[in-house]
Image (cartoon, grey):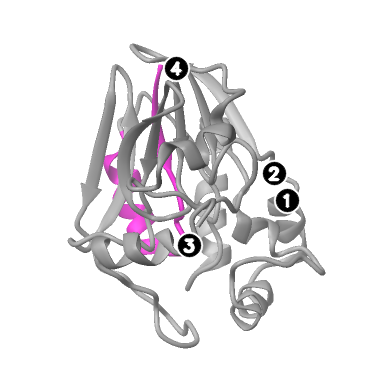
């Protein structure tokens, strides 16, 4: 089996459609969290749910933060805007998604999908975070590969003997080239990039953007153990 990992779509419907056109027909899809918090929240969730059993979902921090009283990383006023554009059943469905998903991928073996780290949906680390500061987050992993997202940048590294891949972001990438970033797994790890336009609709405020170097520097100030 091959798997397309689609992380951090963030309600970017144009970017999602560009990626879905590129995903091979024989690939399963893992939706890696933070799917709705963006310009077209309901439409984005609906598009992915229409894939039925082909799609496997995990919850990201921005999905969890849709719940009443949840504290987190997203600005409260933006989360309120997102809630106002999602129906109640969709919100309830998103906040009840599982935190991880595991499966076998052809040529790779066991793969564990999580949003930030296997421990929680908020831990921050980058390609530069010292291994000793984040090794405990991966110490109990029984898989050949861990796939995560959360920081919106593609990279691969080894942590505590575990191969770790950040799939990047479909809808809000912090990369030097614009477009949608995703990963195709099987028989190895293939980082993918689709060129596409972003329609921000009536999103309140400025849409987040950053170069890769700027994002790494920012996230390192908030990384585990910083």
Residue appearing at x 38%, y 42% in the figure? 166
Q: Position of residue 63 (x, y in %)?
A: 64, 57
Q: Name the residue under label 4.
A: 144
Residue at the disc numbered 2: 97
Q: Nearer the viewer, residue 50 or 113?
A: 113
- Residue 1: percent from the left, percent from the top? 41, 16
Reading the image, the residue beneath label 3 is 10
Query: Spatial distance from mark 2 to mark 4, Cα to Cα?
Result: 24 Å
* Residue 160 falls left or right of residue 117: left
Q: Residues within 10 Å of mark 1 (few under 14, many from 20)?
A: few
| Helix, strand or loop status at disc 2 | loop
Q: Where is residue 211 in the image (x, y as percent from the top left)?
A: 24, 67
Work out whether mark 3 precedes mark 4 in sequence or the reverse, and give the earlier one: 3
Residue, x 31% and y 36% (percent of image)?
156
Give the number of the disc on residue 41: none
The residue that disc 1 covers is 93
Taking 215 as reference, is 75 left or right? right
Of helix, strand and loop, which one carries label 4?
A: loop
Element at badge 3? loop
**Where, by quadrant of the figure, is residue 98 drawn?**
top right
């Amino acid at each position: 089996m091959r798997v397309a990992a689609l992380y951090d779509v963030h309600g970017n419907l144009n970017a999602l459609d560009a990626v879905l056109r590129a995903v091979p027909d024989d690939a399963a899809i893992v939706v890696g969290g933070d799917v709705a918090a963006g310009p077209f929240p309901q439409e984005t969730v609906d598009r992915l749910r229409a894939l039925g059993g082909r799609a496997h979902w995990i919850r990201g921090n921005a999905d969890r933060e849709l719940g009443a009283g949840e504290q987190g990383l997203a600005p409260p006023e933006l989360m309120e805007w997102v809630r106002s554009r999602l129906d109640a059943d969709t919100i309830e469905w998103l906040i009840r998604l599982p935190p991880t998903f595991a499966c076998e991928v052809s040529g790779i073996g066991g793969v564990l999908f999580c949003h930030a780290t296997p421990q929680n949906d908020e831990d921050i680390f980058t390609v530069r975070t010292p291994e000793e500061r984040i090794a405990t987050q991966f110490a109990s992993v029984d898989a050949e590969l861990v796939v995560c997202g959360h920081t919106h940048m593609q990279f691969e590294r080894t942590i505590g003997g575990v191969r770790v891949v950040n799939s990047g972001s479909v809808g809000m990438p912090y990369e030097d080239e614009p477009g949608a970033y995703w990963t195709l797994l099987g028989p190895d790890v293939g980082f993918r990039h689709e060129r596409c336009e972003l329609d921000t609709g009536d999103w309140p405020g400025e849409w987040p953007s950053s170069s890769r170097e700027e994002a790494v520097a920012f996230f390192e100030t908030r990384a585990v153990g910083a």
